[in-house]
Image (tube, grey):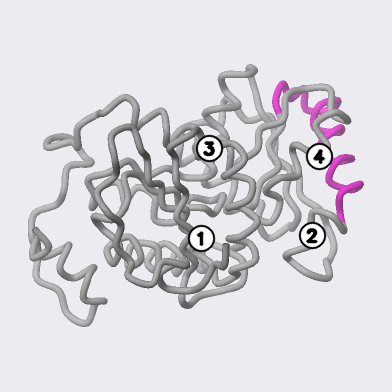
Amino acid sequence: MAVGHGQGGNPSGKLAHPSRGAMNILLLNPNIRTDITELMLQVGREAAAPGTTLIPCTAPRGVPYIATRAEAQIGGAVALEMLAERNGTFDAAIIAAFGDPGLFAARELFDVPVIGLAEAAMLTACMAGRRFAIVTFAQALGPWYEECVRMHGLMDRCAGIRMLDGSFKQISDVQHEKEELLVGLALRAVEENEADVLIFAGAPLSGLAARVAHRIPVPVVDQVIAAVKQAEALLALKMRKATAGTFRRPAAKPTVGLAEALAARLEHRDA
């Protein structure tokens, strides 16, 4: 399936009302690499339940991959715009970047479940062991990922974050180029940090878990599969949108200069 900017391969941007039992889940990549979106789409489709449709969506602007706080802020804002533009066409959404840019804001603004790649992977890992370790492909990701773990209140469950130190040729091929080094970091996390579960973090590492799990002596969580299954679980639970508490929809407020769909959502003109 071709993945493009904007409508993510769906020219109209609209879906028919889902049939009974069907789940339409938006797979929202807040960076500009359609090949990374395609990688996550392939991994997610293999795990999705019958009746689940994953709708790919790639950011129309931004950076090739998000690795810093500043890039995360940009990606989070773009993610909110993308969600607003497609609001009403999906039953749940996955913000498919490991640091979960814009996740809490999206939960505040929209009425459907919104799942973060990092939160889904970490909460799933917590069900498989006492502490998890995160392994990723670049040093720059470490501080942002640590803040993401803290944001989700999971520092006590995190055995450590290990990052490769060095450059890579292509972001789309980093998991193949650096496979041996990534596995080595995972083994060190198990041996030295006493990790009970391992997460390969970062969208470009999607699918790596299945390929190398047999070489690692603890469970390995794939971030995309965890997010898809958590989205399906939340939809199955049929939980209502909060009308009280901190994630209730904010009161209407005037805006200036925002993307029209997002402005309409903030101003309550989208009803």
Decide if residue 82 is on the left or right side of residue 202. Answer: left
Q: Quadrant of the N terminus?
A: bottom right
Q: Which residue is mark 4?
A: 211
* Between marks 3 and 2 in the image, the one whose residue lies nearer the viewer: 3
What distance separates the C-alpha of mark 3 from that of mark 2? 25 Å
Residue drawn at x 81%, y 27% as measured from the top left: 190
Is residue 237 or residue 51 the one in the foreground?
A: 51
**Residue 103, how many percent across, how many down?**
39, 50
Residue drawn at x 51%, y 53% as measured from the top left: 96
* Between marks 4 and 2 in the image, the one whose residue lies nearer the viewer: 4
Is residue 149 or residue 174 the one in the foreground?
A: 174
Q: Earlier in the sequence, mark 1 or mark 2?
A: 1
Q: Which residue is mark 2?
A: 174
- Give the residue type that dot 4 points to: Arg
Q: Quadrant of the C terminus?
A: bottom left
Boundaries of the magenta span: 178-197
- Give the residue type that dot 3 points to: Ala
**Residue 125, how many percent across, how many down?**
60, 26
